Amino acid sequence: MNTVLQHRRPHRAEPKTVSSETFSSLINLAGRQRMLSQRIILNAILATQQHEEAVAVAEQALSLFETSHGELVHGSSLLPGVFFPALHAIYFGEAQADKRIRAFILQARSAISALGTQAAVAEVESLGKQATPLVNLLNQITQVYEAEAKQHAHAQQKEHRALMGNIQQIAKQAKIVSVNAQIMAARAGEAGKEFSVVAGVLTTITGELDELIVSAMKSAQR
């Protein structure tokens, strides 16, 4: 059985840039914690009623729960850990989510270890009292991730629109230059033929750029 995660409080979170896919993974992982916590408690109760395999299921769920908590708080090769202020606040601020979750892990391990002894019923009963407050806490954590993900998506859309606006301005300026170049080439007559070809290519490029901008703007609004 895994030893409980050693408490290592991360430094105060600094905002990081993460992908939408990472946010989805974090939200799914945080949501899964709610299910695992209830599975641990339910199977501990079932084990006191002599249900086969309940102990193994409880142990497996506890192992996954503990590992996932470590990934959410301290990060992994794919996840950033506690990486924005609101998340740091719920884990280490007034709610003390990290401390309470680690206490639940210890309590769950104690209850599972006591199964088959006279202390089992009391241990599991004490663990069962954590079901509602713990799932409420885990709900709050998930909501923090969801709120940050929405802000992240909004900020990305805003930056995307600003970038497209800048590109549009550049394209407009390039179009003006190409038109002026064609006029100058026409005035130059035979000597301006090669310059006219270059100006024509520039006009084609700016037209294609306009089409790409329109397409990108439509995609961003979906």
Image: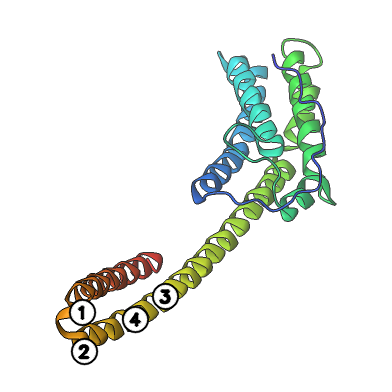
Q: Is residue 106 left or right of residue 140?
A: right
For residue 210, what is the image quadrant?
A: bottom left
Tell me how far mark 3 sits from mark 2, CA to CA.
26 Å
Q: Mark 2 and mark 1 in contact (Cβ < 8 Å)?
A: yes
* Residue 137: % across, % down: 72, 47
**What residue does disc 1 label?**
192
Q: Is residue 170 left or right of residue 108?
A: left
Say which of marks 4 and 1 sits in front: 1
Tell me how far mark 2 sits from mark 4, CA to CA.
15 Å
Residue for point 35% across, 70% down = 213
**Quadrant location, the C terminus:** bottom left
**3 or 2: tag closer to the N-terminus:** 3
Which residue occupies the extreme top position in the image? 116
For residue 126, what is the image quadrant?
A: top right
As drawn, 172 above or below 209: below
Q: Can the viewer see residue 209 in this picture?
A: yes
| Helix, strand or loop under label 3 | helix
Q: Is residue 219 left or right of residue 25?
A: left
Which residue occupies the extreme front position in the image? 191
Say which of marks 4 and 3 sits in front: 4
Say which of marks 3 and 2 sits in front: 2
Q: Mark 1 and mark 3 in contact (Cβ < 8 Å)?
A: no
Q: Amino acid at mark 1?
A: Gly
**3 or 1: tag closer to the N-terminus:** 3
**What residue does disc 2 label?**
187
| Helix, strand or loop under label 4 | helix
**1 or 2: tag closer to the N-terminus:** 2
